[in-house]
Image (cartoon, rainbow, N blue to C red):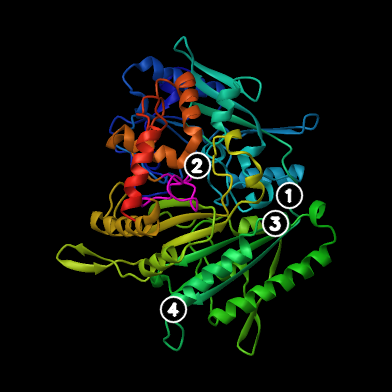
Amino acid sequence: MNKNDRMAQPTLSDRQGFNRRWFANNADLKVYRPTSRAEVVLAFQDIIDAKDIESHEVQITCGRHCYESFVYNGETKAIIDVGSLNSFEYSKKSDTIEMEIGLSNWEMYRVLNNMYKRTLPAGSCYSVGLGGHVTGGGYGLLSRMYGLAMDYLVGVYIVVQNSSGDAEELYCDQDQHCDLFWGVKGGGGGQFGIITKLIFKDAPPSPERMYTINFSWDWQDENGDYLSQEQFTQIIRLFEKSFCDQDPQTWHVWANMLLNHKDAKNISITAFVYYIPEYHGDWAAFELKERNKFSAILKKANQIKLLSKGDFTLFGHPHIPSSRGLNSYANNLKDNFIDYTLRDYTYLNGTQQVSPSGANSFGKYKSAYLTKYWTEDMINSAYAFLRKPISYQDGDHATRADMARSLIQVDSYGGKINTVEPKDTAIVQRSSIMKLQYQTYWDNKMPPGLDNTAQADAHVNWLNDMYKTIYAVSGGVPDPRFSDRVDGCYYNYPDVDLGSIKNGPESLEHALMLYFGDNLPRLKQVKAKYNPQGWFGNVQSVQTYCQEITTENAQSKSKSKAKNM
């Protein structure tokens, strides 16, 4: 196959991912579509030999779930799409499963469950590609029970530019290129090269059953009464006490709380309960215990404010179009108590129920880890912003922004994740009990590549302002240097407003510190060794030439912030 056969003109779909904000509008954009690992090497070699493409002008794509414009932007001249690399192989002798990088989350779940009765604790969005997902951490509904998906990695194949200047596929594990192996376990997709295959060992057993339950409170009930700040606080406290326990006996339950903007009309809690025979023994006894536990939780929830009686919509990740999709019908209404059904699925059926990613929209995201419960100030700030009406100027008219898909999603966290030492992988956050994702979505009739700038600014500014206010005590971001309640941000939920190389090395250093904490110096060393050219770079890639923030400077900043608190 010659170079021209490997390279193709892009279609419109090649220029945009799931987030409609970002578009690769370069007229000279070229796309490589390798169908084998050998062709990945050839594609990268073509780019190296071309000499006219800067390292940050070539990008890798697979699942196309891009929160920021790292792949789809006007500077991108070449894209290597590894989505066609989708083979897998199981070795009974070593109990390892080899999976190429183009497989999606759903394909992985289906293959592992149906063929080997195994699974991995990866994400819920069905179409997310394994490459960036796993190497950025790999977090999902089973993570409290089983840890992060990358914690099961024992080997990785990755294409890099070697010391001779040629593209080469390396194999790395704990013995071979062990520093590179450490880096790809949480350092992010594209950081060091093009990952082509992942090898997992001792993948845990698939749950046999998956139970779901969800319940909500109306922002304004049928009597016209709004959810008060005290009730809002009580809901958060209920979630913390019911679902953030770190006792191993609770790890089989994962839950999220969707603190929706009042335009969405309600806020909700959804829980997923996994039954695993190897861990939980008799099924009937397990189910009875869980039903009794959730009945008690529901009674407490109803005492805060009478639960919603009707259907409601669940946005966020995992995206669930409707509570009726989880069959949360009230099975009795007695003494003003609504007792919801705990729905029983097979594991694969339940996983499919929560796999949709939702409609492709314009979106902005931010993240945070919490090691302790919310403070009253944090709760009060969230309550104020979630009730705040937002408007923007649309031509000559002021238009009210639809904030129905704007929210703070709070996930229960920790469990098995926190049994790994922070230094053992690039993921440093190993003591948190909640993981938060701040989200806002909007839509309009603009064609691909265009957006309503005023509308976008209204949503993004609202999200940024809320985030800064909630984390005011730690400098407007969840900076663990200034508060032991927070522990930075998740690299797979990138947020350029944390810092960017376009704003200078110190700005980027700040963002990378929030992502990687004390592991950042080691990541820089790995980057300098295996990808000193900075291939596949973006504005938040680890850079070997970042200015160091010295201990003296950090202490000085800490004292300065303390004076202003």
- What amino acid type should be assigned to the residue bearing mark 1? Ser
- What amino acid type should be assigned to the residue bearing mark 4? Ser
Q: Residue at x 59, y 76 (%)?
A: 301
Residue corresponding to mark 3: 247
Viewer-side residue, 89 vs 435: 435
**Residue 503 seen from this side:** yes
Quadrant of the drawing holding the C terminus? bottom left
Residue corresponding to mark 1: 206
Q: Residues within 10 Å of mark 2 (few under 14, many from 20)?
A: many
Q: Disc 4 and disc 1: Cα gap in Å?
A: 42 Å
The magenta span reads 475-494
Residue corresponding to mark 4: 228
Callout in the foreground (1, 2): 1
Horizontal placement of 446 versus 226: left or right?
A: left
Q: Disc 1 and disc 2: Cα gap in Å?
A: 24 Å
Residue corresponding to mark 2: 63
In primary-sequence order, the first of circles 3 and 2 is 2
Q: Residues within 10 Å of mark 4 (few under 14, many from 20)?
A: few
In primary-sequence order, the first of circles 3 and 1 is 1
Q: Residues within 10 Å of mark 3 (few under 14, many from 20)?
A: few
- Where disc 2 sits, the SS reads loop
In primary-sequence order, the first of circles 4 and 2 is 2
- Where disc 1 sits, the SS reads loop
Q: Disc 4 and disc 2: Cα gap in Å?
A: 41 Å
Q: Where is residue 337 shown, x and y percent of the image? A: 62, 84
Q: Where is residue 489 shown, x and y percent of the image? A: 46, 46
- What amino acid type should be assigned to the residue bearing mark 2? Gly
